[in-house]
Image (spheres, rainbow, N blue to C red):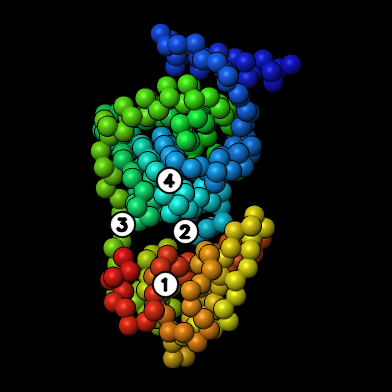
Amino acid sequence: MKKIFFIITIISLLIIGAFVGSQTHQNVVIHDLSNRNYFSRTIESIEKAENSIHIVMFEMRYYPNNTNSSENALIKELIRARERNVSVKVVLEGGEDYLGSDFITKQKLACSILRNASIAVRFDPKGVTTHAKLLIIDNKIVIIGSTNWVDYALEKNNEANIMIVSKSVAQTFENYFQKLWFSSEDAVCITQNKPDEKCLGIGNILQNKDYCNGRLVSAQGIVRELNTRASKSGNIYTTFDLIADKDSIKIFMWGEPDFENEDNVTVVGTYHKEKKVGKYSFFDEIEAEKIKATNVDPDSLN
């Protein structure tokens, strides 16, 4: 009874706060996305998106040393949506002074990952804090509540959220999103267009592990131990060893390769000195963003 009353109260507040003066909304379906329900239902909705995903988020984080985290999984699913031509737009809090420099530094890392995947990202203007946590999918699904895309919110905190399935409700929030979008500014992210010289080549990467950790790197070599399999959630991924002279480094990539063992390739991606996936740890691995046949200028891969 308490749970039902809680959900009814939230729905009432949403309708009163967001829809005053608007038409009566019918055929509304509500789902409880509190706590850990948020991640599973949200990523499922993103996976099924066909046309558009519009997001307003106070905090969004990407964790280079924990690439299997829920936060990273959501960001990667946005990238996959963009790759299948879904329109993805994101409005983020741009970082008021009271939030501190660390806030915007971490925000810009997530922004950079999205921008490098050709996803449109904007920061809200100075002088206003955008504290909303909102997704609008295919102009028919609204996900709204208290959950930021950060580790403690997705994996630890008690958070209250709901999913509203309704075209009319979605249109109301789409109007709200458009106002924020056009009042915001193109995000200036910390974007590496090409790797630092210290992180060019397997030898340099391994000699500068601490410096290159979490950075964009480029390495060229021969493919060995090529292995493609499916994760528990059904996503296809590939691993292999990249060999150059006496040096070797592990490569991880999503999807199936268009190359074979003994091929000579150039890999551009993010280097991880240590990457934790569940209870397992992997060392000296590049999570590939792009892989091309050798003799291609690495700058052309950006």
Residue occupying image coordinates x 42% and y 21%: 172
Identity, as a three-letter code, of the amino acid under mark 4:
Val
Are there few (<14), some (14-19), or many (20+) residues within 10 Å of tag 2? many
User: Along the polypeptide, which appears first: circle 2 or circle 3?
Assistant: 2
User: Looking at the image, is mark 4 or mark 3 nearer the viewer?
Assistant: 4
Q: Give the structural element (helix, strand or loop) at label 2.
A: loop
Specify whether 294 is left or right of 275.
Answer: left
Residue nearest the viewer, comparing 182 with 247: 182
Residue holding disc 1? 291
Instruction: Give the position of the N terminus as an image quadrant.
Output: top right
Do the numbered discs 4 and 1 sit on residues whose CB atoms are within 8 Å?
no
User: Along the polypeptide, which appears first: circle 3 or circle 1?
Assistant: 3
Do the numbered discs 4 and 3 sit on residues whose CB atoms are within 8 Å?
no
Identity, as a three-letter code, of the amino acid under mark 3:
Thr
Q: Rounded to the nearest whole Å, what is the CA distance between mark 2 and mark 3?
A: 14 Å
Residue holding disc 4? 86
Residue nearest the viewer, comparing 185 with 30: 30
Residue occupying image coordinates x 63% and y 28%: 32
Residue holding disc 3? 191
Q: Position of residue 179 (x, y in %)?
A: 31, 27
User: Looking at the image, is mark 1 or mark 2 nearer the viewer?
Assistant: 1
Numbered label attached to residue 64: 2
User: Along the polypeptide, which appears first: circle 4 or circle 1?
Assistant: 4
Do the numbered discs 1 and 2 sit on residues whose CB atoms are within 8 Å?
no
Q: Give the structural element (helix, strand or loop) at label 3.
A: loop
Identity, as a three-letter code, of the amino acid under mark 2:
Pro
User: Along the polypeptide, which appears first: circle 4 or circle 3?
Assistant: 4
Q: Rounded to the nearest whole Å, what is the CA distance between mark 4 and mark 3?
A: 23 Å
User: Along the polypeptide, which appears first: circle 1 or circle 2?
Assistant: 2
Residue 6, by quadrant, is top right
